[in-house]
Amino acid sequence: MARNTSVLLGDHFEEFISKEVASGRYNSASEVIRSALRILEEEEKKKKLLIKALVIGEKSPRVENFDPIRLKLGLCSKLTNITMI
């Protein structure tokens, strides 16, 4: 259920919100704020996943006989296949 919350944004964000509403992209300041919060929520999820992946990587054993050239060639090949789709 929606409820009213009062926040002080400052001149910069007040102007930004006004411009977004005036552009027609949003119908109200509330829509702008909700959109911004959705983006923030997604970024926070990405950050948590990245941190989790880094922790897993740090705990993984050291790779022996690592060949950086072979890795780069493999990555380039995958990238080429992706861009061809």
Image (cartoon, grey):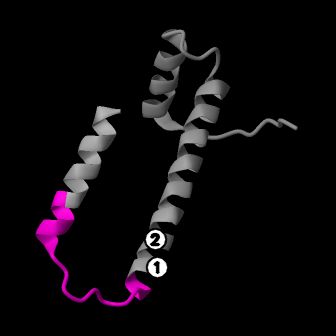
The percent coordinates of residue 64 (x first, y second) are: 24, 89
Q: Is residue 36 above or below residue 48?
A: above
Q: Is residue 55 above or below residue 80?
A: below
Q: Quadrant of the N terminus?
A: top right
The percent coordinates of residue 19 (x first, y second) are: 46, 17
The amino acid type, in three-letter code, at marker 2 is: Ala
Quick one: 33 or 71, which is closer to the camera?
Answer: 71
The residue carrying pointer 2 sits among few (fewer than 14), some (14 to 19) or many (20 or more) residues within 10 Å by Cα, namely: few
The percent coordinates of residue 82 (x first, y second) are: 33, 41
Q: Which mark is residue 73?
A: none
Q: Quadrant of the C terminus?
A: top left
The percent coordinates of residue 43 (x first, y second) are: 50, 50
Quick one: 33 or 83, which is closer to the camera?
Answer: 83
Residue at the spot of label 2: 53
Residue 57 visible in the picture: yes
The amino acid type, in three-letter code, at marker 1 is: Ile
For label 2, the SS is helix
* Residue 24 drawn in magenta: no
For label 1, the SS is helix
Residue at image coords 62%, 24%: 29
Residue 8 visible in the picture: no
Tell me if label 2 and label 1 are in contact, CB under 8 Å: yes
Q: Is residue 67 above or below residue 45?
A: below
Residue at image coords 59%, 17%: 26
Residue at the spot of label 1: 56
Residue at image coords 29%, 42%: 81
Magenta residues, start to end: 58-73
Q: Is residue 2 above or below residue 52?
A: above
Q: Is residue 61 left or right of residue 37?
A: left
Q: Quadrant of residue 3?
A: top right
* Residue 71 drawn in magenta: yes
Q: Is residue 38 left or right of residue 14?
A: right
